[in-house]
Image (cartoon, rainbow, N blue to C red):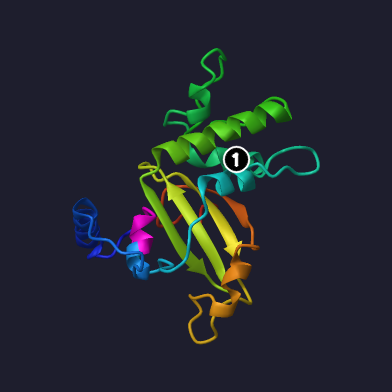
Amino acid sequence: MVERLAARELRAHLNDRLVKGEFTEDQDALTIHLLHGLAYTAGSALGSTPPTQEQCLSAFLVPNKVGLTAGARAWSKHAHRSGGSADSVVDDQEKDRKAAPSGWWGTPRGPIAGINEHALVLFRKIMGDASWRNLHWLPHGVLVYEVRVPEGYGMRWAQDLSGLLDEQDRTRVRVECEERVKGRPWIFRGFVEPMMENGHEVGWRH
């Protein structure tokens, strides 16, 4: 979660241009990236478009065979990863219950409908408090959109663009394939925890 050194200056210059109304319809890829409110990092996918909040929510709410949403399934995998010292987002929504706080994620409990509802609380909390948004590439043509709150907790979505990228530049979609990008859905990839040196060693695998 480290931006390029020039990011702050570029963003300030962009804001100044916005105030002065110095914009044309034809903008460069970096300007468009910053206008989307995205972080500018070494791996940022300049020239690509992040999903809308509606697309993110739709992917989050995709149910499995028993009716558990993609977001709720991911929550069940992350509930144990935030310890018990922080206030729980979900437990804050359940002050009428006598359960002890169970870390930032809270603990899935109760019927499927209730688990889905509380997972949605997490979605709204992260989207509402987000201080970091980035769009970057994973190997094999997978575009990833990541959103995090100041504490470092967040969510990820992925869009598989394999087969659509330029052979000479694997970070750009071929011109003749640009319309096909719209047909590639965004998939909810899961929740993420704050960055830590030994996160993978202790089992915090995203």
Return the residue nearer the eye: 33 or 45: 33
Q: Is residue 108 left or right of residue 121?
A: right
Asked if residue 174 can be seen in this view, the reply is no
Return the residue nearer the eye: 177 or 111: 177
- Which span is picked out in magenta? 32-40
Quadrant including the N terminus: bottom left
Asked if residue 101 can be seen in this view, the reply is yes
The amino acid on which the numbered mark 1 sits, given as a three-letter code, is Trp
Q: Is residue 171 above or below residue 135?
A: below
Count the marks: 1
Residue wearing tag 1? 75
Furthest toward the bottom, the residue is 168
Q: Residue, x 27% and y 61% (percent of image)?
A: 23
Q: Residue, x 40% and y 66% (percent of image)?
A: 44
Q: Residue, x 22% and y 60% (percent of image)?
A: 22
Q: Position of residue 90 (x, y in %)?
A: 53, 28
Packing grade of label 1 (10 A; few <14, some 14-19, many >=20) is many
Return the residue nearer the eye: 192 or 164: 164
Q: Position of residue 10 (x, y in %)?
A: 23, 62
Q: In terms of secondary structure, where does tag 1 sit?
A: helix
In reply to whether residue 105 is colored magenta, the answer given is: no
Q: Position of residue 78 (x, y in %)?
A: 57, 43
Q: Position of residue 56 (x, y in %)?
A: 56, 47
Quadrant including the C terminus: bottom right
